Image (spheres, grey):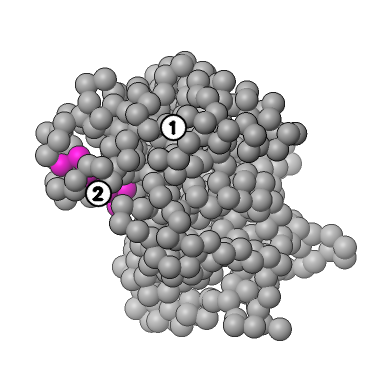
Amino acid sequence: MGKTLFDKIWDKHVVTVIKDGPAQLYIDRMYCHEVTSPQAFEGLRRRGLKVFRPKQITCMPDHNIPTLSQELPVRDPVSKNQVDTLDKNVKEFGLNYYPVRHPKNGIIHVVGPETGLSLPGMTLVCGDSHTSTHGALGAVAFGIGTSEVEMVLATQCIFQTRPKTMRITIKNTLKQSITAKDMALYIISKMTTGGATGYFVEYAGEAVENLSMEGRLTLCNLSIEMGARGGLIAPDEITFEYMKNREFAPKSEAWNKALAYWKTLKTDSDAVFDKEVVFDANNIEPMVTYGTNPGMGMGINEIIPPIDFIEETSRSSYTKSLDYMGFNPGEKITGKPIDYVFLGSCTNGRIEDFRAFTQLIKGRKKADSVIVWLVPGSWNVYRQIQEEGLDAILEEAGFEIRQPGCSACLAMNDDKVPAGKYAVSTSNRNFEGRQGPGARTILAGPLVAAAAALTGQITDPRRLDHK
């Protein structure tokens, strides 16, 4: 029997297997940020251990750093302590480090692919659930807990139970003005937030193959939101072209050798998945969420599902979710006024997202009633925005580009949405309080975010002519 892409990468990295237990898996690269690593480093100190392979660990602060003014020291005392602790730990243990304002600083899941630190065929981990992002390159990438971070620091290995495999195929191609974010939210709305629990997902089909690398990164980023252990896409010419000349990608003869291996990273024709799911790209519209988890999503012109459509056992939590959001079953979300728009995060903070947003904004003006945070995912993206003149177009329309960081994705820094306010957000989670205590989050793609920023309400971007 043939092997799936996941099987090929996993099997190549298994060191040992405990009988009737987990596998000891070798990890090619681990990323560390300031939130989930302090206790892991403290564990090494208590045990008198060094980091086993420091060159394979890359660290940077991203969750707690400010985006309006990255002057040091960080002003917020909690954030300052987090950032200072990471700074101390990486210096003590001799690790690769991109601190605040370093040219390669940014959100770790944006920086990894864009620098070539993440490569096809790798195993990659980080103490962050959205590590699944890196699977877009054709890697097995997943989030781990703090105790597991300590394990990798000490041994460059981790114990993991082998997940089941699932292939999600999206046949046909996406319609105009439909983004990878819309695709992801559509899949999650159909799969539910627990529909892929216990699985590692491979995305396939014409719609996936036609995505840019930025789009694939967005799709894989959201794998965790349907319960999957991770998601990945077979590397192809789009992948290889993206990786070429990246700073840490192989060069010269090493590139040729790597490329030959990467071309073998695809699922065999006779491989069998534990589960197969198929969707049709023709059914995907611009998506928005209406509740308090990413699975509560719908096409932008649909109505919020009536209570009769909800399983009886879930009706109480469904009602609670809508009460929090201030919405009612059976009503439309289009036309609802909003207060904030956030473009950024490890889901939609890449240059392609800013290009899409700017394309719709060009020649128009921001709605006066809306506060808009435009936050690049890295300093590299920030520089690209300037080089392409996107910043001038956005400033003419009344927008301001902030400095890189996780920003309003989560309430761990200064960029918090006030209680009761509505935010159209290109991030990945809309849990209660995710963007600030009492904040109400509507997840969407960059085009829906741009339309909301222009009109001050939930608007189908297809109703605004592209200029």
As drawn, 422 above or below 50: above
Between disc 1 and disc 2, the foreground one is 1
Q: Residue furthest top?
A: 419
* Total marks in image: 2
Instruction: Give coordinates of residue 181: x percent, y percent.
Output: 42, 49
SS type, badge 1: loop
Q: Quadrant of residue 206?
A: bottom left
Q: Which mark is residue 332?
A: 1
Q: Which mark is residue 240?
A: none
Q: Residue furthest right?
A: 20
Cα distance between the residues tagged 1 and 2: 29 Å
Q: Residues within 10 Å of mark 1 (few under 14, many from 20)?
A: some
Q: Is residue 28 left or right of residue 391?
A: right
Give the quarter of the figure containing the N terminus: bottom right
| The residue stretch that appears in magenta | 351-362
Residue occupying image coordinates x 49% and y 42%:
298
* Helix, strand or loop for the magenta stretch, by majority: helix
Q: Which mark is residue 355?
A: 2
SS type, badge 2: helix
As drawn, 101 above or below 201: above
Q: Is residue 291 left or right of residue 172?
A: right
As drawn, 212 above or below 428: below
Residue 402 included in the magenta stretch of the image: no
75 or 402, which is in the foreground? 402
